[in-house]
Image (tube, rainbow, N blue to C red):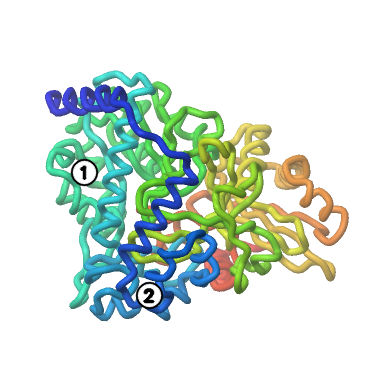
């Protein structure tokens, strides 16, 4: 292990010194789109939209946008991807699709089937290697690279359905990991195949003291649960009493900000937090600098062409559904501090595909973004335009004022006095003055979001806060079959999920105000 660690550290050092030819992000994107279209021109999709002709156009991007419609999951799946599930090759990408990642996000009631091609796996491996090589600038001690990497993901077991394999993306990518990486990777093949989340956490806990872990990867809520479980099992004060070389936490999926104070309480020394944007559709961005805002650099030159749809009423309805013919722009035209929904065209056979996330640019020259939420997790009943990023900041600021930690919460929009109100469900095991917390939360939201402040004097008549035991949030995820792995509690509840939540609270005997 130590020898391999030195090899990896040496490779990182050498790789960082090799001069690299750099093109602008915009030029990279043009080249990427051209490669994607060229490779897919003989597929059913490519023939339907005459990709061969598109390649002859002087302004490729403009012609592409005018010819190919924007898709959400349902339109992409119902028209094209279902044929791949039936074993048909050359539908939206060359060859037969062997793998499908099951992805539900945090709102849909049933799993999405996202195609994962050989080129998708190559794209993820290439960007992962680039991310590892970029760690040189963090001046990390060699001991970290002599240690193992704990990947807290879903089950690596894949189901075979006659023509394809389906399962968690982590299971698909694990099977394609290089052999040398498997020497570092924990919890190992046997435990990684566990489908039951509680059994997996238990086995990791029982083996934790045998391992020398330097890097952990996973969703913050579940990593915190694991750390606490290990600490409690061995009767120690912090996770560093078990893993003294732990130095890096690679996270993704949700903002780390609400969880930082929780990790400070269960760690013996500071961790380097690195955000990643790895989705079933590909590796989109990663944090290559230790910036205060945790912004990530978009990957502009490897297998993904990106468009940005302003997240406004002109392009989305009040439920976050994309309207027909949305106005999509490219990297040439994006602006700082505006919300955009992402359209991706990828080497997985997705074309102008709405991934469902929203981003905000923090640096246009280097194409750095932060994820601000989901298109269906914004709350705008009357024009308040409240994003998940706004919610996180306001909740964290208010929790700090009260000296408590809030990792889980969700918000519901409700009719009230002929107009509207927001109802917050806060997860905390501490005694909280609910009325005072409500008042300060409302005031912090007004400071953060001008639209919210205006609507609080108009159509948004009130704000309600209900404090629940934190375990309620975990129990609800168990009840709906979303406990563990990459599943996150939705920050905004609507539709069927809201009905399930209300039924769950009724079963718990919780009486609403």
266 to the left or right of 338: left
C-beta proximity under 8 Å, tags 1 and 2:
no
In this rendering, the answer to whether 203 lies above or below 355 is above
Give the mark nearest the N terminus, 1 or 2. 2
143 to the left or right of 227: left
Quarter of image, res 13: top left
Distance, label 1 to label 2, CA atoms, is 40 Å
Camera-side residue of 323 and 318: 323
Judging by the rendered image, the residue that carries numbered circle 1 is 187
Q: From where the camera sits, is residue 479 visible?
A: no
Quarter of image, res 346: bottom left
Camera-side residue of 116 and 89: 89
- As helix, strand or loop, the secondary structure at mark 2 comes to helix
Location of residue 200 in the rendering, given as x and y in whole percent from the top left corner:
26, 51
Location of residue 105 in the rendering, given as x and y in whole percent from the top left corner:
45, 61
Furthest residue toward right:
457
For the image shown, how many numbered marks are present on the structure?
2
Location of residue 481 in the rendering, given as x and y in whole percent from the top left corner:
39, 65
Q: Residue at x 87, y 58 (%)?
A: 458
Location of residue 256 in the rendering, given as x and y in whole percent from the top left corner:
49, 39
Alpha-carbon neighbours of circle 2 within 10 Å: few (<14), some, or many (≥20)? many
Alpha-carbon neighbours of circle 1 within 10 Å: few (<14), some, or many (≥20)? many
Judging by the rendered image, the residue that carries numbered circle 2 is 45
Camera-side residue of 332 and 348: 332
Q: Residue at x 41, y 41 (%)?
A: 251
- As helix, strand or loop, the secondary structure at mark 1 comes to loop
The quadrant of the picture occupied by the N terminus is: top left
In this rendering, the answer to whether 194 lies above or below 371 is below
Quarter of image, res 462: bottom right
In this rendering, the answer to whether 164 lies above or below 245 is below
């Amino acid at each position: 292990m130590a020898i391999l660690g030195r090899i990896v550290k040496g490779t990182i050092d050498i790789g960082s010194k090799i001069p690299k030819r750099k093109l602008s992000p915009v030029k990279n994107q043009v080249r990427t789109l051209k490669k994607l279209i060229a490779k897919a021109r003989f597929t059913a999709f490519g023939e339907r939209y005459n990709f061969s002709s598109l390649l002859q156009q002087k302004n490729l991007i403009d012609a592409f946008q005018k010819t190919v419609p924007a898709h959400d999951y349902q339109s992409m799946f119902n028209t094209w991807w279902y044929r791949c599930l039936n074993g048909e090759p050359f539908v939206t990408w060359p060859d037969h699709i062997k793998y499908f990642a099951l992805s539900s996000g945090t709102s849909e009631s049933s799993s999405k089937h996202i195609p994962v091609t050989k080129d998708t796996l190559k794209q993820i491996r290439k960007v992962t290697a680039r991310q590892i090589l970029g760690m040189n600038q963090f001046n990390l001690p060699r001991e970290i690279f002599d240690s193992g990497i704990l990947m807290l993901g879903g089950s690596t077991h894949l189901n075979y359905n006659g023509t394809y394999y389906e399962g968690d993306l982590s299971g698909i990518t694990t099977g394609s990991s290089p052999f040398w990486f498997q020497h570092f990777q924990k919890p190992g093949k046997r435990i990684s195949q566990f489908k039951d989340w509680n059994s997996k956490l238990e086995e990791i806990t029982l083996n934790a003291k045998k391992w020398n872990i330097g890097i952990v990867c996973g969703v913050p809520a579940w990593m915190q649960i694991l750390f606490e479980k290990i600490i409690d099992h061995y009767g120690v004060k912090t996770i560093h009493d078990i893993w003294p070389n732990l130095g890096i936490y690679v996270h993704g999926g949700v903002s780390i900000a609400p969880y930082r104070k929780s990790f400070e309480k269960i760690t013996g020394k500071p961790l380097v937090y690195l955000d990643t944007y790895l989705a079933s559709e590909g590796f989109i961005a990663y944090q290559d600098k230790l910036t205060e805002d945790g912004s990530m650099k978009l990957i502009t030159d490897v297998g993904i062409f990106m468009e940005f749809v302003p997240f406004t009423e002109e392009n989305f309805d009040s439920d976050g559904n994309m309207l027909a013919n949305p106005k999509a722009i490219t990297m040439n035209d994006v602006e700082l501090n505006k919300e955009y929904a992402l359209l991706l065209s990828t080497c997985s056979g997705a074309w102008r595909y709405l991934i469902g996330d929203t981003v905000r640019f923090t640096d246009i020259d280097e194409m750095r973004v932060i994820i601000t939420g989901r298109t269906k997790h914004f709350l705008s009943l009357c024009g308040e335009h409240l994003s998940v990023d706004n919610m996180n900041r306001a909740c964290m600021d208010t929790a700090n004022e009260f000296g408590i930690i809030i990792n889980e919460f969700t918000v519901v929009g409700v009719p009230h006095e002929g107009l509207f109100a927001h109802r917050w469900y806060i997860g905390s095991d501490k005694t909280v003055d609910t009325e005072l917390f409500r008042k300060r939360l409302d005031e912090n939201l007004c400071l953060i979001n001008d639209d919210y402040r205006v609507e609080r004097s108009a159509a948004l008549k009130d704000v309600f806060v209900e404090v629940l035991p934190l375990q309620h949030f975990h129990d609800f995820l168990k009840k709906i079959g979303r406990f563990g792995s990459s599943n996150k509690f939705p920050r905004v509840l609507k539709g069927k999920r809201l009905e399930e939540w209300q039924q769950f609270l009724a079963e718990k005997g919780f009486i609403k105000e």
